[in-house]
């Protein structure tokens, strides 16, 4: 499995689009939240914009880099044929996606930090820490969205289905859960992956232990395990 | 007795009600060049995919180098190099594509470059810097073979390796296959729907039709089944007379023509066989 991860990482570093996406994310992050007059206003604006855009602008390029070319080229055939089990392929791809998401979030944070240093609205260390924690929560959200959409990808062996899955899970599902929670008075939104992670962020902000993050991580690993099982059993003509 | 490297017993595969393989039994011994012959759609590629774990069987057993369980089967797959279609990354050149697969195969980092140079030289792609997306069909096949022989696997599976090649390319592949066994001691399974192609290369044959391996024979069996020799004489009429005087009946007389391949190589001055 480690050999596959190493080979994929080295291969991706030779891919131009990997760097193009990094530049695009850097530029988008620089303008995220605009340029406000007050520190609190700036942080709030950045947070709301990040929540709206981050999962998409990071997860789509990551998905295309990690999964896209395997379907297009059929190279996965050579990997499985060399004795690497399908479940190990799923785990390896998951780890790769976490690494690439981490890389793109680092680019994003660097860009935001530079902007916030330049605009001189007096952002405090506490506000920076809060923003960083929020970005960490969004990072975990993105990892989850990608892992959940990977399930649909492996099920269909189709990149487009995976991309649609990301858009649905990150953009449509949270408001749907929220509406269901409001309408039916059942805590679907609070118990959703995103809801649990945002609750964990709020817990940390008020000095409590972010126990809901642990539940979210259980969701995440369960999704990866189920995906591995599905891919192991599915008949796919490479 | 020869040691078996691949054994398929009563293997069956179907997609819904469509049977792709029916009770397939096949045995390949170490050191063989095994030719799997069958028309398009006969089930050759499915057999290969089953050996490589790319397709799941419905019943029967597949054994690689004596593997007794699934764990051993998976582990022994690393002893196989294969060409089943040419699957490479378009944006990478030959060297970088091979680097990717060499890393997956577990070839030590320090040896990777030397190994890649070696296999690229064998297939005649050394020094080619073009990305894979700019490769001709022949170059793609050559890179596929280079990938298959990375790390000197014990067993080589080549599915229609001459597809899309010109006559010189076909002759080169034929020579390469012989070289793989003679120089590197590899066992080779090669499939084709062109009989003449395998006759020049393989020494054991499996005939597959509509998902069933009908028969396995050796090159010697093939000779025994045809008690005839071909001789060239300078005076045909005189030869016929001598045979007739000695009470030997001529059962069949075939007018020999140069094959298209011979004609081509005579014309361009290349070599079909070395």
Image (cartoon, coloured by chain):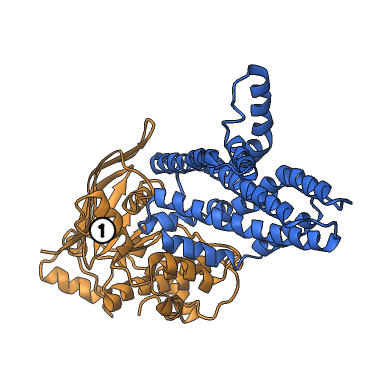
Chain colours: A blue, B orange
Label 1 chain ID: B
**Residue B244 sits above or below residue B233 on the image:** above
State the residue at coordinates (27%, 61%): B34
Please identify the quarter of the rendering in which residue A178 is found.
Answer: top right
Give residue A27's position: percent from left, percent from top: 78, 59
The image quarter in which residue A199 lies: top right
How many discs mark residues in the rendered view?
1
Residue lying at the far top in this picture: please name it: A184
Nearest the eye: A71 or B241: A71
Position of residue A35 relative to residue B125, above or below, is above
Kindly tell me whether residue B169 is visible in this rendering. Answer: yes
Residue in view at x 39 percent, y 66 percent: B105
From the viewer's perspective, is A146 left or right of B181?
right
Quarter of the N terminus of chain A within the rendering: bottom left
Q: Residues within 10 Å of mark 1 (few under 14, many from 20)?
A: many
At a point 64% along the width and 23% down the height, the residue shown is A181
- Residue drawn at x 60%, y 30% is A190
Report the residue that reaches farthest toward the right: A37
Percent position of residue B262, x then y: 41, 73
Question: Is A163 placed above or below B271 here?
Answer: above
Q: State the residue position of label 1.
A: B205
Q: Nearer the viewer, residue B46 or A117?
A: A117
Q: Does residue A126 appear left or right of residue B45 in this picture?
A: right
Res. B167 in view: no
Left of A112 or right of it: where is A196? Answer: left
Element marked by disc 1 = strand
Q: Position of residue B239 (x, y in %)?
A: 21, 75
* Whole-percent x, y for residue A231 in the image: 43, 43
Q: Is residue A113 above or below residue A54?
A: below
Going by the image, does B2 lie left or right of A204? left
Can you name the residue that lies furthest to the front here? A207
């Amino acid at each position: 499995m480690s050999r596959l991860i190493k080979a994929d990482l080295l291969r991706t570093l030779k891919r131009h689009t990997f760097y193009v996406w990094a530049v695009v994310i850097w530029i988008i992050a620089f303008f995220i939240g605009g340029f406000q007059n007050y520190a609190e206003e700036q942080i709030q604006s950045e947070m709301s914009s990040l929540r709206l855009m981050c999962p998409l602008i990071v997860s789509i390029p990551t998905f295309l880099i990690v999964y896209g070319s395997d379907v297009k080229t059929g190279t996965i055939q050579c990997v499985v044929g060399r004795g690497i089990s399908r479940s190990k392929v799923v785990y390896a791809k998951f780890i790769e996606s976490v690494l690439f998401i981490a890389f793109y979030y680092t680019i994003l944070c660097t860009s935001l930090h530079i902007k916030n240093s330049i605009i001189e609205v007096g952002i405090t260390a506490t506000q920076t820490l809060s923003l960083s924690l929020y970005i960490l929560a969004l990072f975990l959200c993105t990892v989850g969205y990608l892992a959940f959409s990977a399930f649909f990808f492996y099920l269909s062996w189709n990149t487009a289905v995976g991309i649609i899955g990301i858009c649905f899970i990150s953009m449509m599902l949270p408001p749907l859960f929220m509406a269901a929670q409001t309408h039916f008075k059942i805590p679907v939104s609070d118990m959703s992956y995103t809801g649990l992670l945002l609750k964990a962020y709020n817990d940390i902000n008020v000095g409590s232990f972010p126990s809901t993050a642990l539940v979210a991580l259980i969701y995440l690993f369960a999704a990866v395990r189920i995906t591995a099982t599905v891919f192991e059993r599915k008949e796919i003509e490479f | 007795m020869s040691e078996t490297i691949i054994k398929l017993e009563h293997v069956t595969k179907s997609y819904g009600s469509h049977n792709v393989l029916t009770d397939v039994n096949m045995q390949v011994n170490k050191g063989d060049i095994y030719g799997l012959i069958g028309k398009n759609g006969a089930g050759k590629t499915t057999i290969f995919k089953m050996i490589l774990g790319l397709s799941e069987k419905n019943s029967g057993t597949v054994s690689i180098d004596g593997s007794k369980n699934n764990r051993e089967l998976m582990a022994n797959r690393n002893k196989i190099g294969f060409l089943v279609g040419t699957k490479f990354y378009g944006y990478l050149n030959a060297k970088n594509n091979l680097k990717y697969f060499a890393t997956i195969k577990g070839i030590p980092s320090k040896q990777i470059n030397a190994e890649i140079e070696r296999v690229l030289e064998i297939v005649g792609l050394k020094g080619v810097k073009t990305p894979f997306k700019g490769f001709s069909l022949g170059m793609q096949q050559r890179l596929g073979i280079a990938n298959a022989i990375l790390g000197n696997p014990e067993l080589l599976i080549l599915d229609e390796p001459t597809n899309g090649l010109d006559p010189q390319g076909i002759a080169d592949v034929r020579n390469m296959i012989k070289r793989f066994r003679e120089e590197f001691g590899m066992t080779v399974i090669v499939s084709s729907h062109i009989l003449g192609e395998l006759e020049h290369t393989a020494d054991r044959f499996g005939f597959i039709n509509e998902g069933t391996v009908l028969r396995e024979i050796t090159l010697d069996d093939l000779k025994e089944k045809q008690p005839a020799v071909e001789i060239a004489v300078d005076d045909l009429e005189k030869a016929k007379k001598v045979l007739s005087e000695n009470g030997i009946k001529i059962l069949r007389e075939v007018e020999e023509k140069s094959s298209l391949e011979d004609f081509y190589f005579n014309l361009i001055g290349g070599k079909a066989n070395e």
